[in-house]
Image (tube, rainbow, N blue to C red):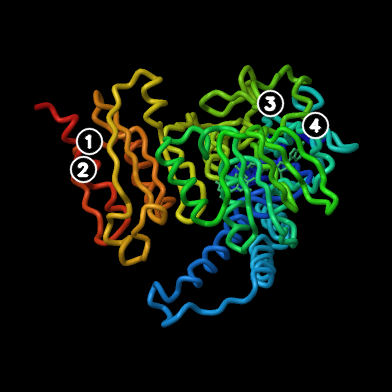
Amino acid sequence: MQVFDVVVLGAGSAGEWVAGGIADQGGSVALLEKLRVGGECPYVACIPSKAMLRSAQARAQARHLDRLGGASAAPGLDPDRLAFAAAVRRRDELSHGRDDRGAAGSIVRRGVSLVRGAGRIAGPGVIVSGASEIGYRDLVVATGSGPVIPSLDGLDTVPAWTSDQALSAAECPASLLVLGGGAVGCELAQAYAGFGVPVTLVESAGQLAGHQDARIAADLAAVLRGSGVDVRLGVSVTRLAATASRSARALLSDGTAVEAARVILAVGRAPATAGLGLAAIGVRPGEGGALRVDDHCRVEGQEHVWAAGDVTGIAPYTHGANYQARVVTENLLGGSRAADYRAIPRIVYTEPPLASVGLTEAQAREAGTDVLTATADVAQMARAATDGAADRAAAGRLVLTADRARGVLIGAAAVGPRADDWICEAAVAIRARVPLEVLADVVHPFPTYAQSYEVPLRELARAVRPA
Ligand SMILES: Cc1cc2nc3c(=O)[nH]c(=O)nc-3n(C[C@H](O)[C@H](O)[C@H](O)COP(=O)(O)OP(=O)(O)OC[C@H]3O[C@@H](n4cnc5c(N)ncnc54)[C@H](O)[C@@H]3O)c2cc1C
């Protein structure tokens, strides 16, 4: 049995990062992958979803070209179906046709031993894959997550897709029912609506986007409604049935019914820990199947087992996976690095996007913090006027949350054009605990959306300044 310094289970964002980082420093490393090197992000998640959203946004902009002064009259556009096919071609180019040969080749060139196949822990220091045994000094579990399939009466009788299937398919459904109003559900709903697909989105919670600030979540609902999505909040599907035309008919908890040619299941994702053989090393996953890790990303109770990415249930984003992978890599190379999750941005890439970082007002109060908040109307920024985004539905707002006693920012959330980029200013402020009076003195270029920070920051700085 060949023994490696490090064996990595799963070659997604986290696994690729760790394996490459160890190999770059001369360590021996085996990377096991049962499907595609690169994991879900480049092929069936981040990249294809952002590609489809971009195409839908380009089409929406083109429709309003005359209002933007780019044409003297509204231009004629080709039919939605033809445009959808073009968007799918572009999506598939950007996601390499879901072919991982390029990614596999580059990881092997870095000196990683790539093993194609599922790996399972057989006991301390030993992984099995097919008939092979592979030894490790350190093990990194980076097996990602999978879609939660809700247990719904009649689900097996209707045409339903997970996000992976939706983002791999060429078909443009005649109509859609999206179950779930998290990032995945909202993004897919807007992308399809942009090609004229009638979309209904059903979310059982009273708001979209999980535990966001309620005002920001309401802005996101307005954005989706403005894109033509029928957003139903606080209702759930009680039963599904196939119609004579093979569509899905969903009965909702409020007594109404929705019919759609396809259902998209976007009710969440669960860490992929089933079947990994964790019991062979005495590890039991936590709630929802997540691998519990300490702040060094070491699996609890294990000296030589680490985890990174969605499998930990912490910060389930590509940038979260890469961050934990950086922490693990540094620790495997002899460092002692602790992860700090206070300022990991969370984005819903609609147009305009929802971007947030840190705590909401409710979360901070629950933690016993003396909280201050201030808001800005992004539509009031000069840039919103020049960009043609000067109404609330198109421009949204910014909500800042501060800790009065410490005089620092602890949370920010926004719906607004390019908020996915300008939220990073708040991320730095939260991570580095920059005093509010310094933040309030920062000068932003004119005209930008980042100027939205200035008035609320001055308000917060005044409120914490001793009289
Ligand atoms: C539709 C969608 C859109 C998204 N968009 C964004 C976005 O825009 N930005 C963002 O930051 N995040 C986004 N995410 C989340 C992001 O994709 C994940 O957080 C990220 O890919 C997680 O990386 P990972 O390495 O933990 O897991 P993965 O990328 O899932 O990699 C895990 C790998 O492990 C392999 N594996 C599992 N079990 C085994 C085993 N036993 N043996 C060998 N291999 C195994 C799997 O085949 C997989 O390749 C999106 C997710 C979805 C579903």
Q: Identify the residue at the far bottom of this view.
A: 72
Dot in front, 1 or 4: 1
Residue depicted at 63% across the width and 17% down the height = 301
Where is mark 3, residue-wise? 289
Instruction: Tell whether 359 sits left or right of 378.
Output: right
Q: Rate crowding at label 2 as few (under 14), some (14 to 19) or many (20 or more) other CA atoms within 10 Å.
A: some
Residue 417 percent across, percent down from the top left: 40, 56
Residue in front for this viewpoint, 167 or 135: 167
Where is mark 4, residue-wise? 120
| Marks 1 and 4, how far apart at CA | 52 Å
Residue 317 percent across, percent down from the top left: 56, 42
- Give residue 440's mark: 2
| Marks 3 and 4, how far apart at CA | 16 Å
Whether residue 8 is visible: no
Disc 3, SS:
helix
Residue 303 percent across, percent down from the top left: 63, 21
Disc 2, SS:
loop
The earlier-in-sequence mark between 3 and 4 is 4
Label 3 near label 1: C-beta < 8 Å? no
| Amino acid bearing label 3 | Gly
Q: Quadrant of the image for the C terminus? A: top left
| Marks 1 and 3, how far apart at CA | 40 Å
The earlier-in-sequence mark between 1 and 4 is 4
